Image: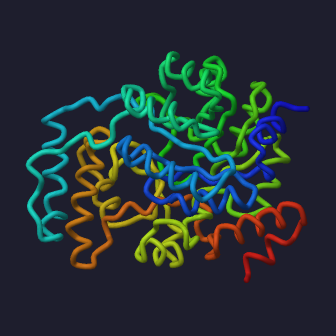
Amino acid sequence: MSPSRNFFEQLSVQHPLVQAPMAGVATPRLVAAVSNAGALGSLGIGASTPAQARQMIEETRALTGKSFNVNVFCHAPARRDAAREAAWLAHLAPLFAQAGTAVPAALAEIYPSFKHDEEALRMLLALRPAVVSFHFGLPPAEQLAALRQAGIRTMATATSVQEAVLIEQAGIDAIVAQGVEAGGHRGVFDPEAQDDALSMAVLVRLLVKRSTLPVIAAGGIMDGAGIRAALDLGAAGAQLGTAFILCPESAANAAYRENLQSDRAQHTRLTASLSGRLARGIVNQLIEHGDAPGSPPPAAYPVAYDAAKQLHAAAAKAGNHGFAAHWAGQGAPLVRDMPAADLVARLVEEMRVPGTARQGASM
């Protein structure tokens, strides 16, 4: 049995399909529906406190007896720079004025890293989800050893061959190969290092040839034809995020759903202006303002995200969602509105029967 096939079979996951974690969007209902349909659902807890994460995991477990994945953020702590943060807030001042609120006096580092969160580690060791996955890097060897000893399987995101080598050396069970087409945050380990912005197809081929680990393709995959193409490239499976946002089980609000179903979904961009790290989302006023020529660099991640969230919260009270982080991949125009279980079934059918993805997209 190949390592690739073994990974999914040992989890009793029927289809080589992973629903991306999508912190803030993936709910226990979505994750359970995906896992109950034979794929691997994923919860993103990087934006949650350990208590909130525990509740979400327990709610998911109450809805499904199947395997699911819990994703954590492994970023380096923010390098606080008072002058840089002040310059960024000054740059955003016209937008705060437009939203009818004062510029924040200070910003906070709103998301702690799993690397330094012993409470989150203890919570995961107590609940023992089937899979824990890592984004933005890897946790310390001691944390990995504890998870492994608890019988938890692991996955980690790589955007380059170099990151994949580190993942394999750390003893992780599978690599999520994130192409530049993917929505949400780039999983780069070091945001200051050169990013070659490899496509999903190129990255998958490079990793399949260089690694003995199962490779799960991510980035721009929206239908069964995309999954089949990834498998043909040598991937063990495919991870889809944007494809699940319109499912009624997701936490996406009405404005996010409307944006995804409009012509605006054709225009996504990698930007650091929302959170302080590169992430792909539907272009909005905040992105255009933050990326405009002559703009100062945004505050570090996740400090810049605090500014964006405060700005959006104020503007949303007046019905203005032009500052919201509507993360989406380049395949966003192919998104479909249907329950998660139906979407999994459709994806599997399209994957197995050539031509059905084209027919499904027109429905």
* Quadrant, the C terminus: bottom right
Task: Indicate the quadrant where residue 204 lies.
Answer: top right
Residue 361 pos. (x, y %): 73, 76
* Quadrant, the N terminus: top right
**Residue found 50% across the figure and 43% down from its top:** 186
Establish if 108 lies above or below 343: above
- 244 lies left or right of 227: left
Residue 253 pos. (x, y %): 42, 72
> In the image shown, does 134 or 232 lie closer to the viewer?
134
- 208 lies left or right of 327: right
The scheme the figure's colours follow is: rainbow
**Residue found 37% across the figure and 31% down from its top:** 119
> In the image shown, does 179 or 122 lie closer to the viewer?
122
Establish if 113 lies above or below 311: above
**Residue found 67% across the figure and 34% down from its top:** 175
Residue 297 pos. (x, y %): 27, 42
Residue 261 pos. (x, y %): 53, 77
- 353 lies left or right of 168: right
Task: Indicate the quadrant where residue 310 lies.
Answer: bottom left
Task: Indicate the quadrant where residue 29 lies.
Answer: bottom right
Establish if 238 lies above or below 284: above
**Residue found 37% across the figure and 66% down from its top:** 284
Residue 159 in sight from this viewpoint: no
Residue 266 in sight from this viewpoint: yes
Query: How many dots with numbers?
Result: 0
- 142 lies left or right of 322: right
Establish if 363 lies above or below 6: below
